[in-house]
Amino acid sequence: MSKRKAREVPESSKKVNGNKENLVSSALFKAAPFTRELREQGIKKKPGTVRVYSDGIFDCFHFGHARALQQAKNTFSNCYLIVGVCGDELTHKIKGDTVMNEKERFEAVRHCRYVDEVLEYAPWVITSEFLEDHDIDYVAHDDLPYGSEEATDIYGHLKSAGKFIATQRTEGISTSDIICRVVRNYDVYIRRNLARGFTRKDLNVSFVREKRAQIAKLTNELRQRVNSGRSKLEQIVEKWESNSQKLINDFVKFFTMSKLTPPYPKTSLKTLPASDSSSELDSNNGSGLHESESFDDSLEAPS
């Protein structure tokens, strides 16, 4: 069995220092995108390539961000997408605190499959000089107006110049929404992280809240055990109800029959023939008179 021949890496793709020809060959190898490094060397972009720029904060990078960048990337078949990410100083000054720091946000965007280049410490307002310096053809962003100290819409001049591409926001997901979920379920996530080995100092919570979270955790575990056995208990109760209903029905049936049917036979004079009843009365009366007469005779004194 022959061994597979190892793939040879072209010399043009190896790391070089300051060699303009090797940089060009490296860019052409595997259709590598046009980068800032090539541009600084005075190399122009590939003809026909459309350079699209999209900027943002990209805090807690989520699939809504990725979909917006996907829309920007798919605007042109030969699109080269540059994504600008604002730094912490500018973001905290204008928009407020972030969950992720600037380095984390840079790397999160850099690992998105639709991004060709990440421009770190991007400006808040896009100027004509900025577009010219980075050889940008179009700017892609959602169509909501974003204000600044100088203008009510920082993308207004781009829209007027026909260099703006409107992307659609994804409903139901945003950085603010993610933060709201965490705040709304604050105690749940405290219990989660305590169970995963974090200390109360790591979570910046008090001793009382830590113990409260531990008690709540035990309560939830007990509730889960009860719920796990609830289905079996429901089956037992259902069977008991069925059997008890059968017993009640049998008892009612037995009690009703015992009321309707007496335990001994009863006879009535109405059932006897008329001749028999009269003869019987006459015989009783006769016997009664003879008995009284004999009784009176027995009471007489002896002579």
Image (cartoon, rainbow, N blue to C red):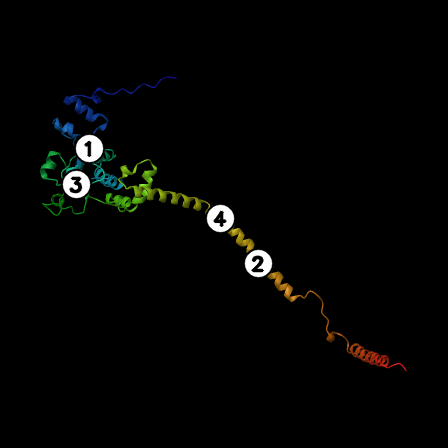
Q: Quadrant of residue 32?
A: top left
Residues at circles 4 and 2 in contact by the CB criterion of under 8 Å? no
Q: Hey, what amino acid is under mark 2?
A: Ile
The residue at which mark 3 appears reads as 92
Q: Is residue 14 above or below residue 190?
A: above
Q: Nearer the viewer, mark 1 or mark 2?
A: 2
**Residue 109 spot, x, y in % from top left:** 22, 35
Alpha carbons under labels 1 and 2: distance apart: 80 Å
Quick one: label 1 or label 3, which is nearer the N terminus?
Answer: 3
Alpha carbons under labels 1 and 3: distance apart: 24 Å
Q: Hey, what amino acid is under mark 1?
A: Glu
Q: Residue at x 22, y 33 (%)?
A: 107
The residue at which mark 1 appears reads as 117
Q: Is residue 289 left or right of residue 20?
A: right
Q: Is residue 127 left or right of residue 113?
A: left
Task: State the SS at label 3.
Answer: helix
Q: Nearer the viewer, mark 4 or mark 1?
A: 4
